[in-house]
Image (cartoon, rainbow, N blue to C red):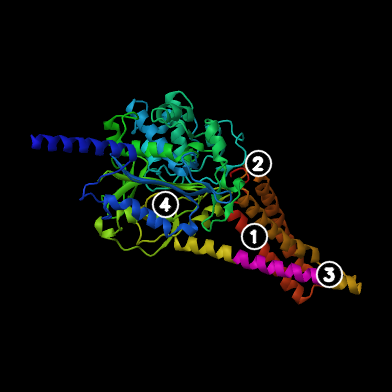
């Protein structure tokens, strides 16, 4: 009898514990459950809080979750969405996904594949209006897999990505058509991260489903998952609540200085590639659907297909891309996608081997602590030897493959790519060949070998132009001082070619300043700065005429002192270098920005 009473009491106690667990979120973890890093499940929450506490002086606002298929190991809202007004991060705080929005595109593509609307072996021309891909260079077909792997070969786009006028383009098709990037690589040969290619995939999703991409996402992802506080369209007008609450989020630099709203929030013309904004709770719902392979989105078979590799690091057999998701390697392989805008950062990573995932979102646009530095705490320390034998890095000049080789912003592609850091000890990479060129393969984008002569010429041209421009500025200042002295002395002696040499120093400086004006105006619509490139083209023609005229006069004119001839020769050299600079970097191509 006593045994029965004890058994009944134990049963009641177990029921009570289950009720308390559900009611108060109390978790019980198996003693042997650990993350890939070796961190026990019951230590995850305290370890993350300790990590945050050590960085609280440089952390603005943060929302995060680490979870398995069955339970949350740690979830938190930390800091402020507005430090000055002491408004904490809450369940209603709206964050931007940035390039994390691309994961929506790839899920939509898989849905279209499941319904038989898209075939991965078919050239995407079949899904586009006739003549739409007028920017193709190679006859090789471009497939949807090429778009997902970012290997369709398109160069980068600089103009009208982040703009200040949401009505500048009527729709996605118009935004894609406005700046079609040249195809500079043969399809399937190199990974060159492409916002344009991703947005093109979203446009195809809309076309094959007979509706706008934004409407499609709402109907087929947001609604099934109950994501009521998510928006996607260029101005977030597809969800007025999100549109209004995004304005309440203040964004910060890494030193906690405020980013003005005008700088932190920009309208993204190719909106599928980076516009999504939502509460953290909605982003969490999507992340959990990804890990759990939620059948409200697509079948288990389609999820399984999505999580099969579509690209590998050279011949290592190590997966590089999984239908748009990137392979990122630590003590264990993970897959996911980073997202950054001017005002927010986030990273969704999944360890599918152990069915553990993490999502960190902050209101600091260049955050590294929670999008990168925290990852080993969860997924363990990276070691190349876990996956392959590390190759030797061939000595060569490399440049980011996500570059611009043709058009008025060619120079932007040069200095944006050559300064890109690459630490061979911190990430998995491999070496392959693209014709005669060596390629260092990485997640997100590769580095392609540049001929040493070409790189030397480009760097030399920039340095020579900078030095001559500096000398030109000094000479103009000196000439101004001399003019003032002559005015005081009332010296009316006419000096031959004085006006020519003065103008010859000014025009190259004007060309450079106009280019950097256009570069600094990239977050406005292109109609604000296209005129600058047109003026550069006119100045280049004037400089060519001045070179011919000046050289002829400097040789034949009488009454020119030796020092004046030397100075005039310097001005002619400055003009020649300026014309070569403008022509080589194609700054005159105002019609191709």
Q: Work out which residue is located at the far front of the displayed protein and give it.
A: 2
Mark pair 1, 2: CA separation: 25 Å
Frontmost of labels 4 and 2 is 4
Mark pair 3, 1: CA separation: 26 Å
10 Å crowding of disc 3: few (<14), some (14-19), many (20+): few
Q: In the picture shown, does residue 445 fall above or below 508?
A: above
Mark pair 4, 2: CA separation: 35 Å
Q: Are circles 4 and 2 on residues that touch, CB within 8 Å?
A: no
Residue 18 lies, in percent from the top left, at 25, 37
Q: Secondary structure at mark 3?
A: helix
Mark pair 4, 1: CA separation: 42 Å
Frontmost of labels 4 and 1 is 4
Q: Which of the marked residues, 3 or 2, is nearer the chain's N terminus?
A: 3
Q: Secondary structure at mark 2?
A: helix
Residue that badge 2 annotates: 527
Residue that badge 1 annotates: 578
Frontmost of labels 4 and 3 is 4
Residue 479 is inside the magenta segment: yes
Q: Is residue 436 visible?
A: no
Residue that badge 4 annotates: 371
Q: Are circles 4 and 1 on residues that touch, CB within 8 Å?
A: no
Report the disc number at residue 428: none
| Magenta span | 464-481
Residue 144 is inside the magenta segment: no
Report the disc number at residue 483: 3
Q: In the picture shown, does residue 214 fall above or below 90?
A: above
Q: Is residue 90 visible?
A: yes
Q: Which of the marked residues, 3 or 1, is nearer the chain's N terminus?
A: 3
10 Å crowding of disc 2: few (<14), some (14-19), many (20+): few
Frontmost of labels 3 and 1 is 3
Residue 484 lies, in percent from the top left, at 85, 70
């Amino acid at each position: 009898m006593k045994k029965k009473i004890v058994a009944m009491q134990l049963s009641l106690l177990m029921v009570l514990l289950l009720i308390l667990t559900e009611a108060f979120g109390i978790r019980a973890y198996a003693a042997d459950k650990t993350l890939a890093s070796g961190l026990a499940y019951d230590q995850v929450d305290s370890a993350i809080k300790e990590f945050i506490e050590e960085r609280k002086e440089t952390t603005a606002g943060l929302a995060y979750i680490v979870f398995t298929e069955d339970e949350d190991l740690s979830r938190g809202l930390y800091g402020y969405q507005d430090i000055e007004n002491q408004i904490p991060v809450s369940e209603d705080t709206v964050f931007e996904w940035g390039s994390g929005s691309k994961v929506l595109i790839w899920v939509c593509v898989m849905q279209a594949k499941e319904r038989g609307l898209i075939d991965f072996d078919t050239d995407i021309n079949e899904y586009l209006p006739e003549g739409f891909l007028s920017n193709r260079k190679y006859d090789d077909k471009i497939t949807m897999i090429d778009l997902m792997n970012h290997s369709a070969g398109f160069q980068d786009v600089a103009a009208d990505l982040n703009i200040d006028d949401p009505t500048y383009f009527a729709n996605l098709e118009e935004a894609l058509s406005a700046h079609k990037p040249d195809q500079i690589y043969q399809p399937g040969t190199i990974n060159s991260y492409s916002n344009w290619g991703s947005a093109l995939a979203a446009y195809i999703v809309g076309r094959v489903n007979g509706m706008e991409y934004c409407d499609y996402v709402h109907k087929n992802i947001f609604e099934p998952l109950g994501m009521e506080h998510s928006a996607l369209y260029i101005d977030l007008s597809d969800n007025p609540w999100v549109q209004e609450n995004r304005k309440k989020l203040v964004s910060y630099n890494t030193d906690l200085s405020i980013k003005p709203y005008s700088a932190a929030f920009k309208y993204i013309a190719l909106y599928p590639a980076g516009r999504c904004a939502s509460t953290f709770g909605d982003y969490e719902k999507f992340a959990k659907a990804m890990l759990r392979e939620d059948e409200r989105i697509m079948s288990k078979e389609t999820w399984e297909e999505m999580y099969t590799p579509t690209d590998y690091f050279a011949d290592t057999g190590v997966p590089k891309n999984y239908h748009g998701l990137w392979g990122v390697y630590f003590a264990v392989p993970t897959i996911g996608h980073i997202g950054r805008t001017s005002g927010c950062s986030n990273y969704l990573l999944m360890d599918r081997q152990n069915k553990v995932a993490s999502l960190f979102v902050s209101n600091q646009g260049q955050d590294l602590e929670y999008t990168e530095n925290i990852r080993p705490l969860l997924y363990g320390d990276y070691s190349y030897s876990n996956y392959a034998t590390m190759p030797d890095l061939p000595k060569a000049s490399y440049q980011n493959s996500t570059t611009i080789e043709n058009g008025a912003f060619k120079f932007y592609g040069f200095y944006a790519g050559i300064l890109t850091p690459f630490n061979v000890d911190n990430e998995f990479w491999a070496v392959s060949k693209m014709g005669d060129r060596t390629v260092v393969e990485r997640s997100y984008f590769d580095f392609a070998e540049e001929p040493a002569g070409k790189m030397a010429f480009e760097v030399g041209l920039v340095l020579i132009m900078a030095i001559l421009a500096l000398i030109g500025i000094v000479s103009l200042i000196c000439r101004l001082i001399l003019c003032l002295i002559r005015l005081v002395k009332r010296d009316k002696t006419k000096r031959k070619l004085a006006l020519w040499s003065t103008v010859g120093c000014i025009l190259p400086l004007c060309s450079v300043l106009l280019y950097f004006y256009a570069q600094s105006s990239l977050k406005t619509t292109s109609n604000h700065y296209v005129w600058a490139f047109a003026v550069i083209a006119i100045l280049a023609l004037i400089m060519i005429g001045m070179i011919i005229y000046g050289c002829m006069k400097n040789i034949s004119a009488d009454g020119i002192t030796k020092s004046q001839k030397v100075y005039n020769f310097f001005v002619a050299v400055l003009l020649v270098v300026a014309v070569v600079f403008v022509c080589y970097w194609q700054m005159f191509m105002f019609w191709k920005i």
